[in-house]
Image (cartoon, helix red, strand yellow):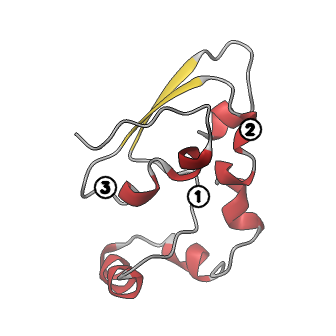
């Protein structure tokens, strides 16, 4: 998604699996899930703890800040139990450019 947002002329389409347009996501059950993941997470957790609010760190990897930069066709694939399952279609849902199938 980040490469597509750079709009390289050669890029005609991308397939993204279990990804998100917004790396800073808060939803129901986030606290329990957060603690469960911290128990199993390698040391990059210290970086995330240092950036607990939306800011430059999260914007750097979140194409939701300017999805208009993505000109290539996108096939976004996500599963029921994927970490970003609810954000797989994220910013695309309000854009007439994007055709969203129902869950299969």
Q: Callout 2: helix, strand or loop?
A: helix
Tag in front: 3 or 2: 2
Q: Which of the image's four quarters has the C terminus?
A: top left
Q: Earlier in the sequence, mark 1 or mark 3?
A: 1
Disc 3 target residue: 82
* Residue positioned 75% across, 47% down in the render: 66
Q: Callout 1: helix, strand or loop?
A: loop
Total labels drawn = 3
Disc 1 target residue: 22
Q: Earlier in the sequence, mark 2 or mark 1?
A: 1
- Residue 57 in picture, x, y percent from top left: 71, 65
Which residue is at the front of the view, 90 or 94?
Answer: 94
* Residue positioned 73% across, 22% down in the render: 8
Please say if the residues under marks 2 and 1 sit with CB atoms less than 8 Å apart: no
Q: CA distance from mark 1 to mark 3?
A: 15 Å
* Residue positioned 32% across, 41% down in the render: 102
Which labelled disc corresponds to residue 68? 2
- Residue 84 appears left or right of 91: left
């Amino acid at each position: 998604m980040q490469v597509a947002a750079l709009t390289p002329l050669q890029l005609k389409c991308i397939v993204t699996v279990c990804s998100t347009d917004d790396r800073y996501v808060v939803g129901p059950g986030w606290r329990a899930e957060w603690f469960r993941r911290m128990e199993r997470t390698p040391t990059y957790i210290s970086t995330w703890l240092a950036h607990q609010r939306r800011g430059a760190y999260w914007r750097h990897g979140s194409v939701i800040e300017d999805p208009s930069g993505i000109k290539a066709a996108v096939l976004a694939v996500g599963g029921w139990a994927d970490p970003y399952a609810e954000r797989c279609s994220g910013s695309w849902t309000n854009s007439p450019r994007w055709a969203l199938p129902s869950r299969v």
